[in-house]
Image (cartoon, rainbow, N blue to C red):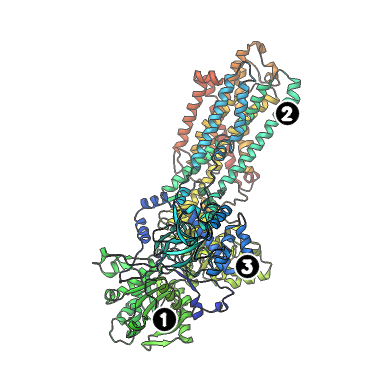
Amino acid sequence: MAADPEIELQVKPVPTVHHHPEAAGGPSSPEAASRISFHYTGPDNDDGDKYDHRATCHDGPAPYRSRSSRRRSRSRDSTASARSRLQAASVYGEIQIEYRTLSIQVSEAKAAAEDDDSDSLSKALLSEPNPRLDEYFFHLPYHELQVHQLCSQLAVDHTNGLTEEAAALRLASNGKNTLPRPKTNYTKKILGYVFGGFCSVLWIGSLIFFICWRPLSDPPSPQNLALAILILVVIFLQAGFSAFQDWSTERTMNSILELLPSDTMVTREGQLKIVPSCDLATGDIVHLRIGDKVPADIRILNHSGDVRFDRAVLTGEGEEIEGSIEPTDRNFLETRNIAFMGTVVVNGSCVGMVVLTGDRTVMGRIARSTFSIKQQSTLIQREIWRFVRIIVCLTICLALTILFTWVGWLRVDHPEFLDVPSMLVNVMACIVAFIPEGMPVSVALTVLLIARRMKTTNILPKDLTTVETLGCVNVICSDKTGTLTKGKMSVKSVAFADHEFESTEEFHRVNDEKNGHMAGPTSALHRAALLCNDASFSPTTMHLPITDRRVQGNRTDAAIFQFAAAGSAGDDLKHATTRVLEIPFNSRNKWMLTLFDSPPQPDEDEDGVRSYHAIIKGAPDILLPACTNYWSAKHNSVRPMDHEARDSIRKLQDTLSKRAERVILICEKTDITTTAPPRTNAFSSEIALVALSNLTVVGIVGIIDPPRPGICHTISECRRAGTRFFMVTGDYALTAAAIAREIGIFSAERELDTINTIKQITAGGTHPMIQGARVTNQTSSLLLDGAHIARLTEDDWNVVCSYEEIVFARTTPEQKLRIVTELRNRHNIVALSGDGVNDAPAMRAADVGIAVASGSDIAIDAADLILLDQFHSIVDAMRMGRLVFQNLQKVICYLLPAGSWSEIWPVILNVFFGTPLPLGAFLMVVICVFTDLFLSLSLIMEKEEFDLLSLPPRDHRKDHLINTKIYGQAYFFTGTVETLMAHSMFFLYMWKYAKIPIRDLFFLYERYREGYYGYTEHQLDQFRATGQCVYFVTLLYMQWGNVLAVRNRRMSILQSDPIRKQRRNPWLVVSILVSLAIAIFVTEVPGIQRLFDTASVPIEFWFIPLPLGLSILFMDEIRKLIVRTYPESLLAKVAW
């Protein structure tokens, strides 16, 4: 069957403005109806349903289903398809999210601002080189000016267009009509990778080692050259790893540049001309036809009556938008009399005037803003940089201390002890010793492996650093439909204004009674439920009973359609009518309209007037004020709306809402007349203007959407983890509250606080909540309607954000963004779940945006985390986020004792106490980059030691990755023991093999040379090299004990060993064997010995240090026992 012709249409009330004195009128008034304008809003309804976003004119009765809906249906079929959608995210995602966010901000500002901005203010803002984007678009006047005003402001004759001279002057003044290209500074990027973090200090070390090789050493020392090259290898390994994590492409910008046409037809000097699009100037008169790409932002002056544009590149939805000559929205970004650069004419033709070109267009401004945004560092990145700064500062201070000591003392009193190359090597050894070079790689791999583990539980993190942020989340804002509920709706209640049926079965029984006492209203409701509906049965299930058939369409329509189809003559009724127009539901209007032909009138052919019948369904609080009649069950006829009937409908709404039912009011309007022909923009506009007035209430249906299995447990787990769980929904307040009680968001049956409670608290001025203090022992819950959000002051928001239990009802996308922003402004870490286009700005504003796999492409592009399965996965994600932080602390606590503390003391003893250097720079690098790295990777694989959800979320302002307790454990406890033991082995070797007692190894300075104790210089160097390798092996064994100790912060190894039981970690054994192999390689291979001045370790020193390594574990076991036994002791308070 051929596709029906389409007219894209969305409608919304224009925000109140002062030049409309009647703006205060309700939607039932003709004045209010005249202020309704067309507005594209995207695919969300009030609680997350997917709608087709079509205002469709039909020649026939077949229901229309958009390509995007079919695409979304297919995406739900499998996890694999969800993964592929994530990998193939829209290349325009950033542009679309920025456009959505800006549109929301401008709409809010337009609704709130006083109409006192002057032309001079607008011009001043537009002339600024870089005004804030929302201010820039807020003050753009071109869509609201009359044509003669626009021509006057731009100094152009709209009939003859610009002269060539005027166009050239404007091009010289404003520049070419081209989009800005992102200035990717590859040099800066590469320098950031190569010199960032610890690498900047390591470069200094490598440079000095090169200098010490040549020209300072005579003859050149190959060991210094080898050390310089080794440090360079470490630097480039870290840089390569960082580049691999950070890689990105320029495909977005290249794709956007392809949007611009090469040539455009314009009117200049009264003649049609073809000019390059880059030469378009402000004021040019442009002619556009079907298939043309719009070359600039153009004000439409005239059109063919059926012109439509595809704004998918901006909105993210491939829905056609009708063009208009008059402004349809005060928001420049949403009005339909502006054709935006990069969009496409998909029907009709138009003539327009160029008002913005190049980087001054909507596309240009957003593109420049998007590509110039600096990536905000995540919590874990900030923590790592904090640690880097501390370590680098300590390193520089220690290196300068050594340097000044040499200059002021050693060079004077012991001139032959350290020459310049030796002093520089010692300084560099200090730097190499104090910096844990392997830590950046360990941290990155920790996050990477946890992220891969999350994928096995059907959680896809798009950004690795977001994984840790999940552990800090203390507020989750979730929508309702399809997330907290099953998303499988069904009609449970049916009622008229003066009668409620006990069940849907009773309604169908009464409706089937011909000429019954309710035949009029039941027939009208049955007909309206079928016709104001886009759902249909799947052709493959038509042979099944109605209750078993699969329904295609959005959830609400599907529920009402299945209810109505259960009655008799359903299919005949739907096929016997001709739908002329449809205005779909959206999250702002909260209603849907379908228009049908009325029976032909006798005088229709004479004056061209045609009559139509409209059916509208939507939120009762939105539609009821526009109703003047109702179908009465008692009188079996239409009656005028009186106070009693209106009150009855409102009571029914509250009653059904308190039973957690979503209430839909179904209305109709007959004998709508118009002279405009169908399938034209004028027809759509005229119908939209008159539809919402003098409606007749047909009936009420209550729809139930059961909670998801396990959602109560999910919410209780989040609450147990110290994370507040809020509902943000478009549902009616009482419905939202009832569902919140059912699933545990409201934890007790009590009277709910409202906006009035908030105002009372702030009026008192002394409540701790006014200062934003979170009152965890309070017994109040808050139910806040979206309509009241605009009235909240700063103090009000402090109070709101202090509640433990909140439901935000009847919210719009603008309000959702405001909620997230206010929560974050009060130092909360916010996660927000969403699945629609309009959720994208709020998801991007949240610390963690969460999308479901069945969500829109733009929502997935804006999200940081995609859930492929049940929403309960969010609990697993939080647990793993906390595990990341815990394991990172273990990794760092493991790395610091040997990779920093135990390596710096040999340098200190050598410089200040004149001992032979107990550990060389090469072996320091081997410890940091090889042996310790492999052992630290085994800690990454550790499972949680105890229930991490029993702890509150980490306070990112206080609970740092590295704190004084970890420094104390790593340096003063473990590090000191390791240092003492390793030095004791060094001195033991020197005593046993060189026969030099420990007292004769201190304060030697320049005396450790040829003739000392009768040895040659070569023999002394060989003793020192072997002693350094003994120190290295001892430190390796001590780290084995350390890794076994730090894997458990509180539990004993007897309760949680790495071989057996739940926390089995075979990687620990593997990493110990690998580190041992590395130690044998660097000490026993002759080539390495010659190049890096290492030596074979005597066999006994491969075994003597083993018990010393176990001493670390034994001492830490005693510490843990004391902490467990005496949790209030001083040791317990300082324990990490």
Q: Nearer the viewer, residue 1097 or 734?
A: 734
The percent position of residue 1050, horizontal first and vertical second, equals 55, 44
Disc 3 marks which amino acid? Asp
Dot in front, 1 or 3? 3
**Tag 3 secondary structure:** loop
Up the image or down, 214 lies above or below 952; here it is above
Residue situated in front as seen by the camera: 353 or 927: 353
Q: Earlier along the polypeptide chain: callout 1 or callout 3?
A: 3
Residue 22: quadrant of the picture: bottom right
- For the residues labelled 2 and 1, the Cα–Cα distance comes to 91 Å
Q: Tell me the CA gap for discs 1 and 3.
A: 42 Å
Q: Which residue is mark 3?
A: 117
What residue does disc 1 label? 697
Residue density around tag 2, few if under 14, some if 14–19, many if 20 or more, within 10 Å? few
Give, as a three-letter code, the residue at label 2. Answer: Phe
Q: Separation of disc 3 and disc 2 at Cα? A: 65 Å
Marking on residue 404? 2
Element type where label 2 sits in the image: helix
- Pointer 2 with pointer 1, Cβ within 8 A: no
| Secondary structure under the numbered disc 1 in the rendered image | strand
- The residue drawn where x is 56% and y is 29% is 231
Q: Earlier in the sequence, mark 3 or mark 2?
A: 3
Kindly tell me whether residue 719 is visible in this rendering. Answer: no
- 372 up-or-down from 574: above or below: above
Residue type of the residue flagged with mark 1:
Val
Residue 1102, how many percent across, how many down? 52, 23
- The crowding category of the residue bearing disc 1, from other C-alpha atoms within 10 Å (few below 14, some 14 to 19, many at least 20), is many
Residue at (68% x, 68% y) in the render = 765
